[in-house]
Image (tube, grey):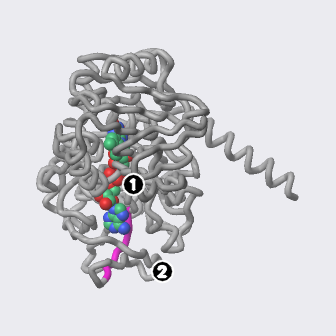
Amino acid sequence: MTENITEVVVIGGGYAGVMAANRLTQRDDVRVTLINPRPNFVERIRLHQLVAGTHEALADYGKVLSERVLLVVDTVTRIDSDGRSAKLAGGGAVSYDYLIYAVGSGSVDPRVPGATEFAYPIATIEDAQRLRPVLGATPDTAAVTVVGAGPTGIEIAAELAEQGRHVTLVCGGVLGPYLHPRGRRVVAERLAKLGVIVLEGGEAKVTAVTRDTVELSGGHTLRSAVTIWTAGFGVPDLAARSGLSTDAAGRLLTDETLTSVDDERVVAAGDSAAPSGLPFRMGCQSAVQLGPQAAETVLSRIAGKQPATIDVGFAGQCISLGRSAGIFQVSDKHDTANKHYLGGWPGAKLKELICWSTVWQLGYEARKPGKRTWWTKDDKRQQLLQAKGQEASTAADRAA
Ligand SMILES: Cc1cc2nc3c(=O)[nH]c(=O)nc-3n(C[C@H](O)[C@H](O)[C@H](O)COP(=O)(O)OP(=O)(O)OC[C@H]3O[C@@H](n4cnc5c(N)ncnc54)[C@H](O)[C@@H]3O)c2cc1C
């Protein structure tokens, strides 16, 4: 601390990091620095639209970030938690009293021969910007294969098929694993209407990708002029590289206050956080809730109070199915899909409203930090934590 100012550094200017940085500005004696590799905010939830050319995916930080937050455009290469500083790729380091780790997620190593060389991920803006001209240079009649049938795969398949492209969606398992069977039927019907060929089941796992083919476990080979890889997100390895404890996927391991299990001064939020080793589903839905709660943990510590434990509630999953249809799959608060959904054109309108309002709420937090809280008690998480604790003590008893 210098001159009674507490320095808080936030790494990552995505949904979680921006929410956290904005919320921290509640205190005048806190100086907030946000480090992000780009000078603009990326609306990752619109990256499939960026690829298809139906929407841009960049927003001005001036619209979403408080004027009180100092934005440093750089990449953190290492966190020195003993020395309390974050080393920058551009040279030098930024010191902190508290650090919020919100580096998000990106594409994951596909571990399928040829996929890294020949398939295009769309998990980051750089991925999407690389794919867009490739599609632009590919005739509309050429075969496009989308691998992975989670929300990202469904969204890009529908977006491109609506533009008249010949799309095959290779599920590797079931279409939309999160969806309730009723919601899944709606998605399947819409994809069929758009002409998307959906390959489901054990025979539809990709075993190899070449420049112009996709090989499947069932022995089939698909011709594919462009292959888009959407099967899962991975997280940056910054925490692991910095000697901080992570879960198996590389997310920073924290307690239920989002505090690193190694260091009280390091707090995590968003896709790159693994509270109690029980991470939430990756998504901006959880990121915009975890960001402010990470900030509250830091603010509590500064005030000499015990931080509250996290509370994250879910409403469902909203998937666009092209520009004129969508589905809002309703879930319980603890993130299990139920039989309710809103489909068709109203689903598309709701999806657009969600995309718009997500950016709006970042700006609202910038203007009125701490005014809005919306998280609700999720009783199931307590049960999960108890079950995990019991499992660990049984394993310890067995080992003794
Ligand atoms: C096409 C697509 C559609 C999606 N649709 C939805 C949806 O409808 N609903 C939903 O809930 N989720 C959706 N998601 C997922 C959602 O976008 C992410 O889960 C969300 O962005 C996570 O937020 P975050 O703040 O944790 O991380 P991010 O938004 O990934 O932000 C992390 C930031 O940290 C930066 N960073 C990384 N490493 C460093 C470093 N070393 N130094 C400095 N900065 C660093 C990154 O560059 C990035 O700017 C979608 C994703 C994609 C790709």
Q: Position of residue 144 (x, y in %)?
A: 35, 38
In primary-sequence order, the first of circles 2 and 1 is: 2
Q: Position of residue 351 (x, y in %)?
A: 26, 29
- The residue pinned by badge 1 equals 106
- Mark sitting on residue 310: none
Q: Name the residue rendered at 31%, 39% in the picture.
A: 373
Q: Which residues are magenta?
A: 93-100
Q: Is residue 249 visible?
A: yes
Quarter assignment of residue 247: bottom right
Q: Nearer the viewer, residue 236 or 188?
A: 188
- The residue pinned by badge 2 equals 82
Is the residue indicated by label 1 positioned so its CB lies within 8 Å of ligand 1?
Answer: yes
Q: Position of residue 115 (x, y in %)?
A: 46, 53
Q: Position of residue 237 (x, y in %)?
A: 47, 65
Q: Circle 1: is it few (<14), some (14-19), or many (20+) Cα within 10 Å?
A: some
How far apart marks 2 and 1 lie (CA) works out to 28 Å
Q: Nearer the viewer, residue 290 or 319?
A: 319
